[in-house]
Amino acid sequence: RELYILSKSLNKNKVKIPKNIKPIILKMDIKHDVVVFSDQKPIAFCFGFFSTKIYLSTTLIEIVTPGELHTILLHERHHLRKIGRAHV
């Protein structure tokens, strides 16, 4: 039940992917795998039941450098491709 509530909350707070991170996402070939959501905490994680995605908070995107974001996305992409399950 808690995962269901988390899923609904993430979808409710979903926002458009900012233009400044689109080039990084496209270069990494994860355009369809990234979801950005509004949150005051800087957080990144993989989550999903049937279609696992990489979730990034707006605050995380605002406070990290492009290089740091690339490193975070590499880490999360590893979970996405190798593990394929949520580790929250």
Image (cartoon, helix red, strand yellow):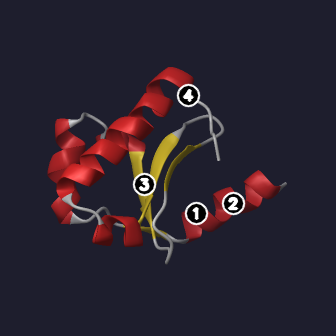
Identify the image quadrant of the N terminus. bottom right
Q: Which residue is mark 2?
A: 6
**Of callouts 4 and 2, which one flags the residue occurring earlier in the amino acid sequence?**
2
Q: In 3D space, how far apart are the residues under numbered discs 3 and 1 (Cα atoms)?
A: 9 Å
Q: Residues within 10 Å of mark 3 (few under 14, many from 20)?
A: some
Q: Amino acid at mark 2?
A: Leu
Mark 1 lies on a secondary structure that is helix
Mark 4 lies on a secondary structure that is loop
Percent x, y of residue 36: 41, 61
Q: In the rendered structure, find residue 35 and report the number of the disc placed on it.
A: 3
**Of callouts 4 and 1, which one flags the residue occurring earlier in the amino acid sequence?**
1
Q: At x 40% / y 34%, what residue is drawn?
A: 77
CB-based contact (under 8 Å), mark 3 and mark 2: no
The relative height of residue 4 versus residue 54 in the rendered view (above or below) is below
CB-based contact (under 8 Å), mark 3 and mark 1: yes
The relative height of residue 11 versus residue 22 in the rendered view (above or below) is below
Q: Which residue is mark 1?
A: 10
Percent x, y of residue 16: 34, 66
Mark 2 lies on a secondary structure that is helix
Q: In 3D space, how far apart are the residues under numbered discs 1 and 2 (Cα atoms)?
A: 6 Å
Q: In 3D space, how far apart are the residues under numbered discs 3 and 2 (Cα atoms)?
A: 14 Å
